[in-house]
Image (cartoon, rainbow, N blue to C red):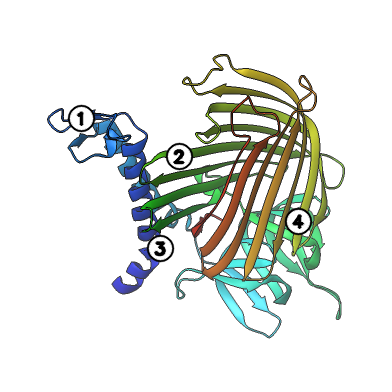
Amino acid sequence: MDLPARGLFFLPQIVLALSIQRILDVYSVSLQPVRYDYAVRVNSSQHPHPFLTRGRLEQSRPEMDLRAGIVFLLLCAVPGFARESTDVIVMKNGDHLTGEIKGLNQGVLYISMKYILGTSDVQWSQVDHIESNQLFLVKTEDGNVYAGTLSTANAEKGRPMTIEVVQTPERKVELERPKVVQMDTTSESFWQRFNGQINTGITYSKGNQSTQFNLGSEIAYPRERWQASASYNSTLSTSTGVTATTRNQLNLDAERLLRWNNWFYEGLAGLLQSSEQNIDLRTSLGGGIGRLLSNTNHVKIYVMGGFGFQRTQYSHNVAISNPQQLATGLVGAGARLFRFNKTTLDATITVLPAISQPGRVYTNLNATYYIKISGSLSWNVAFYGNWDNQPPPTFSGSDYGTTSGLSITFGNR
């Protein structure tokens, strides 16, 4: 690959890294403790945000090292997943492609080829033949998962292509192509099993000098019968004459397939900070059993139910000093709708009716619409929100909003 091509390959990563660097700079000024040059410090009664006034802000060495480390990891993340490009794909029209199969998701087979910049998207329904010595986790629409190398079995004329998953030399499984809905590369290397995406965006309005930064990330670690994942979303809104508002949410999830088709059990954990609702920290834990109602190359829908626990610590400057702790039920649902190489809609909702305080209900909703730009780069528009129908007196019962920006995927996505 020549120098200009290498520059283009790293361009999305560089843009993303610089955007996140800017967001981290703002966060470090707005949210982290700072030391002032007392020669320029002003009276806080005249300036509601003394940390935003003109003066020298001294940042500690660890904070600078942390931001530099994050940017460095973003620049290095995508190239670190490369391997040999020896997989063979034959299309129905006779075209032969040789490269590296990254994975299959949402009816799209992702391929990386040495002579083409970035990742190519191939419509799965148009593939006629496939060969790979790489290990894959192959998932079917009925919920079964198989691990092994890939080849194509001989099929009778008029029959769908049959994928042969070679688990061992003595054990092979044949699957019809339409029933295969997801493939993830796996490896003996721990780090090469991860996949995910990073989202970032900035919105600015000159009229009231308002700025909103948003940063989000998702990472997943898939295995044959289980998967662990984590997601983080953060927003910072500033405006002239108004206190800056922040919202940070971290979700952890682990699920394991049961022996019955499309049934699974799942454990959830979440942390939420919301200045709009005066929440310093809300900790949520839960678990239950769920089922995939639809799992095809065009749509994935699931529901789940179980029990949970929630602990909320409100800000120290409000009347409530002790954390509120509640036992809850747990009802959740999610849907993912996609069109080949164009758009994806991803939505999840969780409802937690309080058992120890009947009538109180917590609701969390996240929805994101992705529009494919090129390769691993997409534009996204997202809606987020959380509601409490019985908040403490004078407190806001909701915090919701919209964001938009760029998304870049890594690993097998």
In the picture, the disc for residue 78 is none
| Mark before the other along the chain sequence, 1 or 3 | 3
Q: Which residue carries the number 4 mark?
A: 300
The spot of residue 385 in percent (x, y) is 62, 44
Query: Cα distance, mark 1 to mark 3?
Result: 36 Å
Q: Nearer the viewer, residue 91 or 231?
A: 231
Disc 1 and disc 3 in contact, CB within 8 angstroms: no
Q: Quadrant of the N terminus?
A: bottom left
Q: Which residue carries the number 1 mark?
A: 36
Q: What is the three-letter code of the residue carrying label 2? A: Thr
| Mark before the other along the chain sequence, 1 or 4 | 1
Q: What is the three-letter code of the residue carrying label 3? A: Pro
**151 versus 336 height, above or below:** below
| Mark before the other along the chain sequence, 2 or 1 | 1
SS for dot 2: strand
| Mark before the other along the chain sequence, 3 or 4 | 3
SS for dot 3: helix
Q: Which residue carries the number 2 mark?
A: 245
Does 238 sit left or right of 50 as displayed? Answer: right
**161 versus 142 height, above or below:** below
The spot of residue 219 in percent (x, y) is 55, 46
Q: Nearer the viewer, residue 231 or 384?
A: 384
The spot of residue 16 in percent (x, y) is 40, 56
Q: Nearer the viewer, residue 63 or 133?
A: 63
